[in-house]
Amino acid sequence: MLNDMKYRVLLTGGSRGIGKAIALALSGKTERLYLVGREQSALEQVASELAGVDVVILAGDLTDATFQGRIVNAVAEGGGVNLLINNAGISDFSAFEQQRPENIERLVITNLLTPILLTQRLLPMMLRETQAQVINIGSGFSYIAYPGFAAYSASKFGLRGFGQALSRELADTTVKVRFFSPRATKTDINPAAVNWLNQQLSTAEDSAEEVAQQFMDFLSTDRAEYQVGFPEKIFTKLNQILPALVSRALYAKLPVIRRAMAFSSINS
Ligand SMILES: NC(=O)c1ccc[n+]([C@@H]2O[C@H](COP(=O)([O-])OP(=O)(O)OC[C@H]3O[C@@H](n4cnc5c(N)ncnc54)[C@H](OP(=O)(O)O)[C@@H]3O)[C@@H](O)[C@H]2O)c1
């Protein structure tokens, strides 16, 4: 699809982790980058590593409607974007019955409501582009709902549903909506309890740079969805066809997941 074109990109969560790695991997293909995160100094650091890219730093809280308005104004003044990457996200590993209601609310607002609203605000401009795309960053938990991640899974399943519906709704326009899902990745989003759990369960973990490379491969195709990791893809298929089998496999892991949840509650 948009293989040879230079992108004008709005990337949320570009200050660190997967977002930062995507910003760097995209640099050769980017004309202008609107880089969004909360921490000005972290965004400036990323910008300093992006030679030859016109970077516009937008520091603020994406869940704030006023800040969303500022983003849209900045993009409009700069001539629009043809690639919106909704990457910013948070997690909160916890036993559901102990999870704070305000944490649940923040998860759903950050991971689901905010990308939906930001996409809606930017869509009129994107529809005027000859070709444009929205890429939502999901998770393996967009496909496999996982113990200890009930609210997070809900937000990521929701984001996948939103994107799929919108891609169908926009099928007769110039805007594509696609979905890219990393598996466990070594970034700050994962607290010690999740890192411990991943070790105990021998969960494969990628570096942010490896994920960004796979994102670039995905970007060069016109696939609607991409999930990182072959075993994870198989597990997803199995979950669609025989969910009881996946439930049984996760039941066997529940004692260690419960230990990690207990560890998490002590440390939070
Ligand atoms: N790491 C994993 O294991 C993993 C696996 C699957 C999917 N993912 C998904 O990949 C995406 C990136 O995660 P990551 O691992 O790179 O996490 P990360 O290292 O914690 O980075 C998260 C990014 O989101 C930004 N962000 C969060 N809340 C924000 C808000 N309210 N306003 C503005 N910016 C906000 C953060 O910026 P500031 O801190 O500066 O605000 C940061 O740039 C997320 O959607 C996550 O769900 C991650």
Image (cartoon, rainbow, N blue to C red):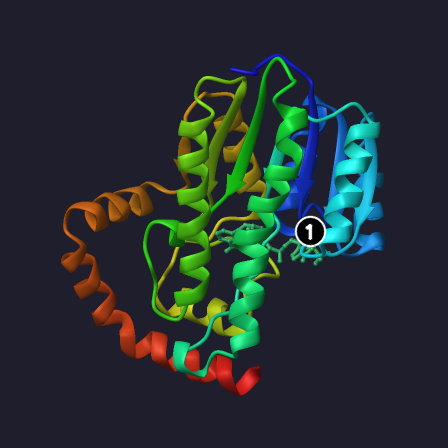
Q: Residue 195 location in percent, x, y?
A: 49, 67
The image quarter in which residue 189 lies = bottom right
Q: Is residue 264 left or right of residue 61?
A: left
**Quadrant holding ligand 1?**
bottom right
Name the residue located 64 percent from the left edge and 44 percent from the top edge.
Answer: 19
Name the residue located 54 percent from the left edge and 68 percent from the top edge.
Answer: 105
The image quarter in which residue 78 lies = top right
Q: Residue 60 location in percent, x, y?
A: 78, 54
Q: On the image, numbered disc 1 is attached to which residue? A: 16
Dividing the image into 4 quarters, which one contains the C terminus? bottom right
Q: Nearer the viewer, residue 148 or 260?
A: 148
Q: Say above or below: 48 vs 39.
A: above
Tell me if residue 186 can be seen.
Answer: no
Q: Residue 21 location in percent, x, y?
A: 64, 42
Q: Is residue 201 left or right of residue 217?
A: left
Q: Residue 71 location in percent, x, y?
A: 76, 41
